Image (tube, rainbow, N blue to C red):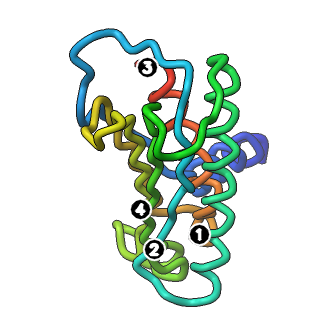
Amino acid sequence: MKLLRRCIPLLCLLLCACGTVRSAVVTAPNAPLSTAQFAFTPVTADSKEKNPDADAYNTQLKADAQQALSAMVRNRGGKWVKAGSNAQTIVVRGHSVYGNRALRAFVGWGAGSAKITVDISLQAADGRVIYATRTDGKLRRGLAGGNVLTVGERTIQKAFLDFDKRF
């Protein structure tokens, strides 16, 4: 009985897998970056699925990314300027495949898996990409199919931390 009580939390932890998050530099800068002004562009988020639930998830993830972007610029001591100026632009794009929760819960083995990708790039005034990163979050299994929004929030946080530390 004691062994069962000790194993239950471990079993729950294994079944509640919240996915994995990985980052990569897509375009590395040629020289150290020192920018204090950024042109504002709205964050975009879309998904493969076209239904009310996916739209609600996209709206939530877009709001989370916009908050993370504002916090990153504020923490760097930067300021926003109007688009069209000679300032560099940070472009954030999110794309999601929410998958199927029931397949993740009952079939496993990657069936119904979800994937959230966040691309962040710093563009020069002429549109040339100076620096870009891509962060992928994946959810393949989990208790009751896992929570896609949790993986999405972790992916966004990791994407901005990774972009900022290499910036």
Precedes in sequence: disc 2 or disc 4: 2
Instruction: Name the residue beneath numbered marker 4.
Output: 115
Per the rendering, the mark at residue 47 is: 2
Disc 2 to disc 4, how far (Cα)? 10 Å
Q: Position of residue 64 (x, y in %)?
A: 67, 51
Instruction: Name the residue beneath numbered marker 1.
Output: 58
Disc 1 to disc 3, how far (Cα)? 26 Å
Could you say which quadrant of the image residue 117 lies in?
A: bottom left
Disc 1 to disc 2, how far (Cα)? 7 Å
**What amino acid is labelled 1 in the image?**
Asn
Q: Please tell me whether residue 114 is drawn above or below residue 82 in the rendered image.
A: below
Question: At 54% across and 77% down in the image, what residue appears?
Answer: 101
Precedes in sequence: disc 2 or disc 3: 2
Question: At 41% across and 69% down in the image, what residue appears?
Answer: 113
Residue nearest the viewer, comparing 6 with 60: 60
Precedes in sequence: disc 1 or disc 3: 1
**What amino acid is labelled 2 in the image?**
Ser
Disc 1 to disc 4, how far (Cα)? 13 Å
| Callout 1–callout 2 Cβ contact below 8 Å | yes
Q: Which of marks 3 and 4 is in front?
A: 3
Residue nearest the viewer, comparing 91 with 28: 91
Disc 2 to disc 3, how far (Cα)? 28 Å
Instruction: Name the residue beneath numbered marker 3.
Output: 167
Q: In this view, does 141 lie to the left or right of 28?
A: right
